[in-house]
Amino acid sequence: MSIKEEIIKIKNSIPSNVKLVAVSKTKPIEDIMEAYKAGQRDFGENKVQELLEKEISLPKDINWHLIGKLQTNKVKYIVGKVCLIHSLSSIKLLDTIEKEYSKKNLTANTLIQINIGREDSKNGIFIEELDELIDAIERSKHCKVKGIMTIIPKGSDEENRYYFKEVKKIYDNLKERKFKNISMEILSMGMSNDYKIAIEEGANLIRIGQGIFGKRVLGGNNNG
């Protein structure tokens, strides 16, 4: 199927309240434009440099999501260019976001990335580190948390469901608490192979790359 047909198929299969982010990392401008012409407006990139190169060349009404690990020395380049940072995972990164966004008096919208499978190969904080990060976020003036993101370990449908349920518990717990800078609006979990289970377990944002664009050209961490 074409990129357009894949997008239509996915959008027809998911609830209206679930946002689709097309993971466009390593994909050429032509592929992204085909998705754009099919009505897709939210695109996810892993690397800051690649995002910036594409952002210059593509329509300005695209919503760019930074879904990969964000290095502190790259934060300054994305200020005002991304709608959502999915990978807030440390106080060090938070402090850098606060510093760089304050220079332009802008606010960063972010998701806390949780490493639910405690994998060395994955970015994200462990559950026991969450309260300390929350305390720091509450002191922030230029960073808002809009929800949670996770990338679960590869496994069976049953194992996937377990991890999605665990993250949803964290999300629900935080949603019941009152914060100044934190609101649980977005639960970003689920990719090409498991997004249907993720939606069943409460995801309202899914990240799909291969399921739209086909197999990736280059290697790297899988976020779609």
Image: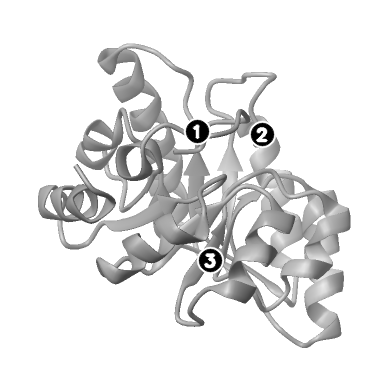
Q: Is mark 3 on a helix, strand or loop?
A: strand
Pointer 1 with pointer 2, Cβ within 8 A = yes
Q: First in sequence, mark 1 or 2: give its number.
A: 2
Dividing the image into 4 quarters, which one contains the C terminus? top left
Residue 185: horizontal and vertical position, in percent? Answer: 40, 62
Instruction: Tell me what residue is drawn at x 21 percent, y 47 percent.
Output: 6
At label 3, the amino acid type is Trp
Label disc, if present, on residue 111 of the rendered structure: none
Q: What element carries label 2?
A: loop
Question: Residue at label 2?
Answer: 123
Query: Which is nearer the eye, 125 or 219?
Result: 219
Q: What element carries label 1?
A: loop
At label 1, the amino acid type is Ile
Q: In this view, does 108 lie to the left or right of 177?
A: right
- Which of the two discs, 1 and 3, sits closer to the camera? 3
Question: Residue at label 1?
Answer: 151
Label disc, if present, on residue 64 of the rendered structure: 3
Q: Which residue lies furthest to the front in this view?
A: 30
- Which of the two discs, 3 and 2, sits closer to the camera? 3
Q: How crowded is the residue under tag 3: few (<14 C-alpha within 10 Å), some, or many (20+)? A: many
Residue 45: horizontal and vertical position, in percent? Answer: 57, 52
Q: Is residue 104 left or right of residue 116?
A: right
Query: Which is nearer the eye, 29 or 140?
Result: 29
